[in-house]
Every structure is written in C-alpha cells, then in structure tokens.
Image (cartoon, helix red, strand yellow):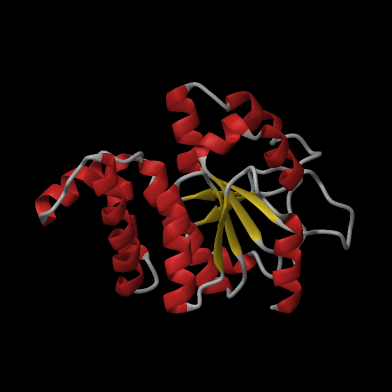
Amino acid sequence: MPRRETSILEKLGFPKELGRCHGTPLVFFDTNVLFDAEDLVKQIFRKQQPGTEIAWGVICDFIEGEARNLRKGLQLLHELKNPEYLGYYFETGYNSREQSMHSFKDMPMGEMAEVVLVEYDKKLDPSGMHATTNNAKSAARSKSKFGDFSLLTVATIAAFRRKRQSVIVSRDRWIKLSCKALQEKFRLPLYCYDPWNFSVQEIIERANRG
C-alpha cells in the first residue's frame, strides 16, 4: 500500500482512483456523526503504528459541504487535517442536491440503484409521505439531504471495485436497510453501523476472513 500524506486531504479523483485504497477497510461517516460522535471519528482517523492499521476513515466533499451549510462540525474537520490524523478525502461530482440525484447513475449496476431506491420508497410511507406514483416518489426523494444519496453511492462503488469492506457510520434507517439489501442480493461487502454500536472488532474479523 503506498504511503499516504499525513493529512486527510489527499485528494483522490472519484471514482477512477478508488483502486489505490487497497486492502484496509474504508469507513465513511455521515454528517450527523461528525456532530454527535466526535470521539469515534477521531479514533478511526488517528494515525496508527505501522502494521496496526485497522481501517481508514473517509470524508467526502459533500459531507464537508453539508457541515459548512449547517455551520457545524467544521472545527473537527479542521482538526482532522493535522498530521496526527490520517485518512482519505474524496472529491466527487455529487456535492449538491441536484448532483446527488444523478449519483445513482454511477452505481456499478442499474439493479443496485433500483434496490436502493426501493428501500428509500419503503421508508417514505411511515413518514406520512405516501408517494404512490413515480412523480410523487421523485418529488419526495428530492426533499432528501443530498449527502444521503451521495454517501451510499460512493461507499457502494468503493466496495464493488475494491472487493473490500466499505463501512458506513450512520443513524439513517434507509442507509442501513439499503446496505443489508446490497449485501444479500449482490454479495457486496457493504455494512452500516449506528455510531453507538460501532464495532472495530467486527470489521477486523471480517477483513481477516476475507
């Protein structure tokens, strides 16, 4: 594995250079985790001793974009740029709501995008947004925060191309169910953890089995 810059801001062109992140599982965080589980984020990004790397944290441009829009989490993002932290920074084409709605076109297969959207539509009904037509579903989806669509797309492509674990840390039920569906239907090594039940040990055990 090539030596990384001692900064989270090593820019990887998305998605063509995803293959550079060989071997070690990648851990993706959604914006809310930056606000609510700062210690967990720091744990994953903190520089490891040689031979003890367990996972590499990832911050995508749309996560930073959301943090800037909300004016929250920026101090943590700035701290992660210090040399004591390591990780990856992905520049994507999804750093807006409009761009994120096109992100599913970049899924490895159209069937994967459909599985994800089916899970999203299932989520809408319990929320009171009874989207029963395609137009209604599209309108309801457009109300989503753009980071959700973008995050799942990037993590899915990373898992598919690397044949290695991608782990999303999120409280979002739709993301959790989508990851589960992609595991079951496509054998994709994509997993979702709530920040409060995040398990480094499970990640290590799966990586060793793989």
Residue 96 appears anywhere in the view: yes
Q: 88 left or right of 182? A: right
Question: Could you say where residue 97 lies in the image, as x and y percent from the top left?
Answer: 31, 41
Question: Could you say where residue 162 lies in the image, as x and y percent from the top left?
Answer: 58, 72
Q: 175 left or right of 48? A: left
When asked about the image quadrant of residue 126, the answer is top left
Question: Could you say where residue 181 lies in the image, as x and y percent from the top left?
Answer: 42, 68
Residue furthest front in the image: 126
Image quarter of the N terminus:
bottom right
| Residue at left offset 49%, top offset 71% | 183
Image quarter of the C terminus:
bottom right
49 vs 205, nearest the viewer: 205
Residue furthest top in the image: 71
63 vs 137, nearest the viewer: 137
| Residue at left offset 10%, top offset 51% | 135
Q: Is residue 191 above or below residue 85?
A: below
172 vs 51, nearest the viewer: 172
| Residue at left offset 64%, top offset 43% | 196
| Residue at left offset 65%, top offset 29% | 76
Residue 93 appears anywhere in the view: no
Question: Could you say where residue 53 lies in the image, as x and y percent from the top left?
Answer: 80, 59
Q: 198 left or right of 67? A: right
